[in-house]
């Protein structure tokens, strides 16, 4: 048998060390002003008020340019309005379009989209070298802010939990380039050897 | 026009892009004055969000001036100063008619599981965002609102997501008077959630993070008790100890997909992208809340599966509540709080940078350099 007096939660009382409403109201600006759940903006979660949104249509006019726009197969139709930021194109576009054959409930859908993202990024980097503005990993990663924004002082001696994995980031960013460069060098050497024989 | 564009994981730059056009009769074109970098932008920046395309412009927190309106726009005119919720929504679908603006069904053909969001990949509809000089704003009669004359511009931009989301997160907790509320994450959303928990009658508010400068802000801005999880072997046990082994009544996950605290989850979730993020904070929330308690999730997660301790949530009888924030529903009450002096949103802003410097701004925010909490991007000096 324990010698100490049992306390919450082993007995029914609530913890005793919660300050009173008066103490909290005096200390915290605005304490308790939204105390009544029924008076909160998101209560209840669903409020049927179609007239209160500003919409003056039952169904919006449909945006033009609908042909070929990819959509989730969980949609019964293409939505009347959609974004046009970056239309599908190239190899990555084909991968992404294929991904949209699968529902959002299938891992294949999301994994193919991620594959499309990587192909898009690698292809765009390579293609940028044929332009007047090739990718610049120094400026585009913003890594120069390490010097301007106290990179070392911000990280070390602060007890930060992310220091144990942040070393992986340069590998994630630069690793594929190192592998690709090494592969290209090996291929070039093999071709040169083949030419000598 | 100049705009931030994505070039692949961890790489962005400012490019000249064509001016956005009116593509629908209820569109507006807004000249962005101020935008912000959100913690959830980092998920895109790190390549975590599927269907993030090279050339996409991020930015779902922005304010500006109406430059042009489509022929059916009735509520806005050229020259109006507007704040734009991060949600793109139609106002008339099944979900919008019920106040679920963040779950609109008429704006995102790419997915049914999420509504439309500015500058947040094609998985949320493929809309370019506001980290640019100009942006297309669909349904101009529904989402945007004219910024009141009395409102500080920086407060207005913070209302477009971070403040509204923090406040919404506290509401999802169903806080009752005297509750102990734990908030994981002392970033902008966590700070606002902690502050908002007091409005709803919390008896104790505890904020957990590993960045000491952010915990200091939680103490001064949100009057919260703080715990640095990096200083403890097991933060869940510490939460049990500080609540007399009961657990917190409400826990708010204001961290989301890039939580720290478990190496394996970090590597599989954020480096290798094998999960929809690393659900460390969510798992801690599930374990730190009391049986029968509520876990509110406003930290953003990707659409892929995550290793969440669902069995504990079941066995503890928890209520799990979550959503993207229906921003505009929060505004009237938050306007009151600002006017009544209950909070000053831009107290958490640490950096203001020109659009041209946005690559360094992202790196600084991602790497948590220079005591960065919230960075505003000045697109067009007003």
Image (tube, helix red, strand yellow):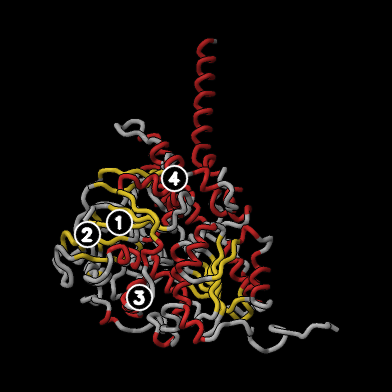
- Quarter location, residue B89: bottom left
Name the N-terminal-most of marks 1 and 3.
1
**Mark 1–mark 3 contact, CB under 8 Å?**
no
Left or right: B369 with respect to B128? Answer: right
**Mark 4–mark 3 contact, CB under 8 Å?**
no
Q: Are marks 4 and 2 on the same chain?
A: no
- Quarter location, residue A69: bottom left
- Quick one: SS at disc 1? loop
Left or right: B376 with respect to A112? Answer: left
Residue at left offset 60%, top offset 76%: B248
Label annotation for residue B130: 1
The mark lying in front, picked from 4 and 3, is: 3
Judging from the image, mark 4 belongs to the subunit labelled A
The mark lying in front, picked from 1 and 4, is: 4
**Mark 3–mark 2 contact, CB under 8 Å?**
no
Q: How far separated are the C-alphas under marks 1 and 4?
A: 25 Å
Residue B187 lies, in percent from the top left, at: 47, 61
Q: How far separated are the C-alphas under marks 4 and 3?
A: 33 Å
Residue at left offset 26%, top offset 68%: B144
Residue at left offset 57%, top offset 46%: A156
Q: Are marks 3 and 2 on the same chain?
A: yes
Q: Which residue is mark 3?
A: B341
Label annotation for residue A149: 4
Residue A170 lies, in percent from the top left, at: 52, 40
């Amino acid at each position: 048998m324990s010698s100490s007096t049992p306390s919450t939660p082993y007995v029914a009382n609530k913890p005793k060390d919660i300050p009173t409403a008066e103490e909290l109201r005096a200390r915290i600006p605005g304490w308790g002003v939204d105390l009544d759940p029924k008076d909160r903006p998101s209560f209840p979660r669903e409020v049927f008020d179609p007239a209160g949104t500003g919409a003056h249509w039952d169904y919006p006019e449909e945006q033009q340019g609908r042909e070929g726009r990819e959509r989730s197969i969980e949609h019964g139709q293409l939505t009347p309005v959609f974004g046009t930021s970056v239309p599908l194109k190239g190899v990555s576009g084909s991968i992404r379009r294929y991904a949209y054959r699968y529902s959002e409930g299938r891992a294949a859908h999301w994994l193919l989209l991620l594959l499309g993202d990587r192909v898009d990024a690698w292809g765009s980097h390579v293609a940028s070298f044929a332009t007047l503005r090739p990718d610049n990993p120094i400026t585009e990663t913003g890594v120069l802010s390490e010097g301007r924004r106290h990179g070392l002082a911000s990280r070390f001696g602060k007890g930060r939990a992310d220091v144990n994995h942040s070393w992986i980031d340069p590998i994630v960013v630069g690793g594929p380039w190192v592998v690709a460069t090494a592969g290209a060098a090996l291929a070039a050497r093999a071709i040169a050897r083949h030419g000598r024989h | 026009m100049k705009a931030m564009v994505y070039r692949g994981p961890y790489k962005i730059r400012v490019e000249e892009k064509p001016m956005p056009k009116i593509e629908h009769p209820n569109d507006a074109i807004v000249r962005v004055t101020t935008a912000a970098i959100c913690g959830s932008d980092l998920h895109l920046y790190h390549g975590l969000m599927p269907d993030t395309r090279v050339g996409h412009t991020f930015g779902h927190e922005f304010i500006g001036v109406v430059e042009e309106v489509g022929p059916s726009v009735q509520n806005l005119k050229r020259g109006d100063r507007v704040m734009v919720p991060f949600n793109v929504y139609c106002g008339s679908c099944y979900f919008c008619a019920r106040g679920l603006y963040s779950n609109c069904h008429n704006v995102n053909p790419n997915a049914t599981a999420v509504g439309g969001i500015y500058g947040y990949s094609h998985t949320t509809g493929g809309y370019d965002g506001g980290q640019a000089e100009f942006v297309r704003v669909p349904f101009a009669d529904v989402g945007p609102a004219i910024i009141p004359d009395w409102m500080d511009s920086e407060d207005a931009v913070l209302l477009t997501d971070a403040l509204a989301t923090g406040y919404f997160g506290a509401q999802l907790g169903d806080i009752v008077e005297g509750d102990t509320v734990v908030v994981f994450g002392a970033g902008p959303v966590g700070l606002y959630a902690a502050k908002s928990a007091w409005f709803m009658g919390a008896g104790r508010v505890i904020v957990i993070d590993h960045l000491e400068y952010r915990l200091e802000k939680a103490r001064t801005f949100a009057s919260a008790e703080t715990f640095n999880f990096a200083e403890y072997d097991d933060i869940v046990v510490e939460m049990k100890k500080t609540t007399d082994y009961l657990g917190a009544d409400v826990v708010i996950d204001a961290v989301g997909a890039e939580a720290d605290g478990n190496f394996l989850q970090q590597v599989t979730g954020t480096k290798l992208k094998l999960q929809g993020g690393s659900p460390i904070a969510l798992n801690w929330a599930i374990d730190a809340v009391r049986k029968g308690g509520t876990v509110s999730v406003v930290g953003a997660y990707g659409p892929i599966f995550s290793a969440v301790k669902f069995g504990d949530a079941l066995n503890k009888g928890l209520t799990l509540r979550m959503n993207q924030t229906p921003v505009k529903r929060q505004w009237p009450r938050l306007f009151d709080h600002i006017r009544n002096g209950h909070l000053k949103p831009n107290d958490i802003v640490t950096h203001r940078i020109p659009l041209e410097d946005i690559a360094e701004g992202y790196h600084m925010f991602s790497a948590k350099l220079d005591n960065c909490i919230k960075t505003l991007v000045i697109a067009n000096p007003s």
